[in-house]
Amino acid sequence: MNFEAIKAIYKFEMARTRRTLLQSVVSPVVSTSLYFIVFGAAIGSRVQEVGGVPYGAFIAPGLIMLTLLNQCIGNGSFGIYFPKFTGTIYEILSAPISTVEILIGYVGAAATKGLIVGTIILATASLFVDISIAHPLMMVLFFVLTAVSFSLFGFMIGIWAKDFEQLNLIPMLVIPPLVFLGGSFYSIDMLPPFWQTVSHFNPVLYLVSGFRWSFFEIADVNPILSLAIVAGFLAACLSITAWIFRTGYKLKN
Amino acid sequence: MAPIVRIENLTKSYATGFQALKGVSLDIEEGEILALLGPNGAGKTTMISIVCGIVTPTSGRVTVAGHDVIRDFRKTREIIGLVPQELTLEAFETVFNTVSFSRGLHGKRPDPALIEKILRDLSLWDKKDTMLRFLSGGMRRRVLIAKALSYEPKILFLDEPTAGVDVSLRKEMWQLVERLRATGVTVILTTHYIEEAEEIADRIGVIDKGEILLVEDKAALMRKLGRKRLTVELAEPVEAVPAALSHYNLSLGDDGHTLVYDYDTAGERTGITGLLAALAAAGLRMKDVATEQSSLEDIFVELVGGAK
């Protein structure tokens, strides 16, 4: 195991985070605060409790997930896309490092950053609403598994993307609908039956539901199923990444 | 001693059908400086990229210090340094950090003292905290070299190290290669500047259209193909080479105004003394005499031209 290389990539990626501190930390905090003011205070005061939880608190886990997903996909994709774009990828490809080590370095750094920002959002949320965590261990498990899976997902987007447009395509076009329709701001039993069925095909529903369960013990789907879906997503991302490195897809010619 | 790099029947075809390498074999000895000469698109970079692991070969095999570059990639890549042709660097990283990054990437523990020495040797020390995007082209080239030296490779590939570099930096590069040779590093450089190969290489390989045309000791190559030519300019033109001079194999040039004599510098007798005496004896008045040596450039043009 080339630990020095993992450390070098990880440190390099974290240094990039520090350079972009404003956009990586401050902007999610600002947008989350806006969500709480608009949804939590303005609308929430007119909405009854959802499953016994005040509406402001109810949306907090979904908001944390929204930020976590955006951060992890953004960092995971940018971290590997940029060396491809500038050509510095030659150094990674010609270094004595294995696939696993490259992944630990890039995905580890992207997940770390996502977790840091997610934690800051959690702290921000607790300024606006009362938050209790019923199952801290499960909460951390959901938090970390989601961060790693979506950083890996971002990593794949970064390898697949030919240009900046493709790089932003999935984070901008695919993720927001999945998050907004994934029960971040409502319980899906508020939907008409048809849309309830559709929602069950949305993977983000399971994430948000499971994550919310670890806070308030209310869930749209069984938490164990949620966990299985997250683990399955992680496994799928891992096997696709393994294939990418084995074949050199879009990395080597 | 076994060669440090052994390339056997290496081929590379792209999906477009383009064949970049057509069965290249090459042995590189430890400690030597090998120059690979060839026009753009000859396959030089492709070959280097395969040795370094950036490009996957279609067929053939490469071993470095006895290890297969694909199966034992850790062992081979640890000892290979690569300075790419393109000036590819991060934009926002500092000089010191990017060089330290390369060292880490190759599994070596941090060694700030060594990084300092490398940066000083390359006149980069006062730029150590400068962001890479603010550097000039020459400085960026130096940074790429510093990155490759940061993990103390045994074999260094320099892909067109002096392309677009000014004269003083080019001289500095040559001195650097000399210093590396003194420490036992094997250096393989590609170039299309012939004087560069002539100046610093021990051996020269000529590659064109994906094939190695020849690999030869530089001195032997120069000797073998390095003929000299003596041109005698006559005061009065002649219609034919005088019969008394026939055994010199002279040819007539410039409408009989010059006599051209090709000879071999490696030969025991060049025959010049005799020829000049014979010219005088034949009553020919000489206006001027010039000699020229065929350079590596002529040899190269002849080889590459001949292969077309």
Image (spheres, coloured by chain):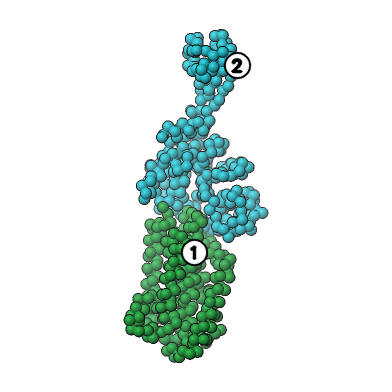
Res A142 seen here: yes
The residue located at (43%, 70%) in the rendering is: A173
Q: Give the camera-side residue of A87 and B113.
A: A87
Query: Do the CB atoms of the residues marked 1 and 2 lie less than 8 Å apart?
Result: no
Q: Give the camera-side residue of B125 and A16.
A: A16
Amino acid type assigned to the residue bearing label 1 in the image:
Phe
Packing grade of label 2 (10 A; few <14, some 14-19, many >=20) is few
Tag 1 residue: A78
Amino acid type assigned to the residue bearing label 2 in the image:
Lys
The cyan one among the chains is: B
Q: Give the camera-side residue of B202 and A179.
A: A179
Res B169 quadrant in image: top right
The residue located at (46%, 63%) in the rendering is: A165
Q: Is residue B175 above or below residue A41?
A: above
Packing grade of label 1 (10 A; few <14, some 14-19, many >=20) is many
Q: Nearer the viewer, mark 1 or mark 2?
A: 2
Q: Is residue A203 above or below residue B265?
A: below
Tag 2 residue: B287
Q: Is residue B255 above or below residue A24?
A: above
The chain to which mark 2 is attached is: B
Question: Marks 1/2: CA distance?
Answer: 73 Å
The residue located at (52%, 86%) in the rendering is: A41
The chain to which mark 1 is attached is: A
Percent from the top left, x then y, of residue B156? Answer: 52, 47
The green one among the chains is: A
SS label for mark 1: helix
The residue located at (53%, 61%) in the rendering is: A8
Q: Which mark is residue A203?
A: none
Percent from the top left, x then y, of residue A201? Answer: 35, 76
Percent from the top left, x then y, of residue A155? Answer: 45, 65
